[in-house]
Image (cartoon, rainbow, N blue to C red):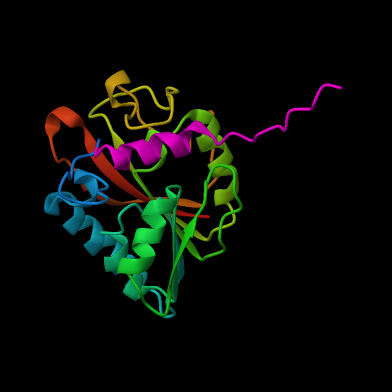
Amino acid sequence: MQKLKKKIKTPWPTKNAMTQIYDKHLWGGNDFDFYSGEGSHHPDIVKPYVETVTAFLKSHQKNLSVCDLGCGDFNIGRQLAPYASSYIAVDIVKDLIERNKTLFKAANLEFRCLDIAKDKLPKADCVILRQVLQHLSNKEIISIVKKLSNYKYIILTEHIPNGDFTPNIDIISGQGTRLKHNSGVSVLKAPFNLKVKEETILNEVVFDHRKGRILTFLYTM
């Protein structure tokens, strides 16, 4: 009698791609165990972002609860967490999350390993997505965007081309972005069509004119 083969559930390729990025230091930082790239460490990018988001968090009489989706090596999150009532930091790479748990400890801080495209997202007042969607396929972004209406505020950062560009050209999830296609993510446009009450540009950084600009939006839901 022929044995039935056990069906093995294979992970989405994004998890493998992101794990490889850190294992092979594809975003740089060979002297670090985990390194989330220039966008998480260069002071000309990090300093204005942290100042802007901190000012927003401090502007509320009662501290907001925050969910950081794609927290990476937590170089930025560690600077924001003190201004939140609770701060849940999420990433898809298990070893990275375990490393963060060891290095960063606070009463209001929690780390979770989740695939934000397929898993249920933590509850919070405010969600942070900093240069995460730009690395994902449209299919995954659609899945994530459907869950964002559960939050009161969305702080979304994307690296987009200078001047006119075609939004939301599809890519395979991984290290790269849509910039080489003269494209960038716009969650308000098709095929994502996120509905918001208000849109504000919190911050804009032109780090290298040849490489576009980094925009941080605040969406009020």
- Apparent side of residue 174 relative to residue 43 in the rendered image (left or right): right
Q: Residue furthest front?
A: 1
Judge by depth and name the residue closer to the eye, 174 or 211. 174
175 up-or-down from 122: above or below: above
Q: Locate residue 111, reporting x and y percent.
A: 44, 63
In the image, residue 10 lies in the stretch drawn in magenta: yes
- Apparent side of residue 114 relative to residue 8 in the rendered image (left or right): left
Picture quarter with the N terminus: top right
Residue occupying the point 34% across, 25% down: 183
Q: Is residue 176 visible?
A: yes
Judge by depth and name the residue closer to the eye, 56 or 111. 111
Residue occupying the point 45% across, 23% down: 170
Q: Is residue 218 visible?
A: no
Residue 180 sits in quarter: top left
Magenta range is 1-25
Judge by depth and name the residue closer to the eye, 131 or 103. 103
Q: Locate residue 121, reporting x and y percent.
A: 57, 55
Q: Locate residue 155, reporting x and y percent.
A: 39, 54
Residue occupying the point 40% across, 34% down: 17
Q: Locate residue 203, reporting x and y percent.
A: 26, 51
Q: How many marks?
A: 0
Residue occupying the point 24% across, 50% down: 40
- Apparent side of residue 121 relative to residue 21 in the rendered image (left or right): right
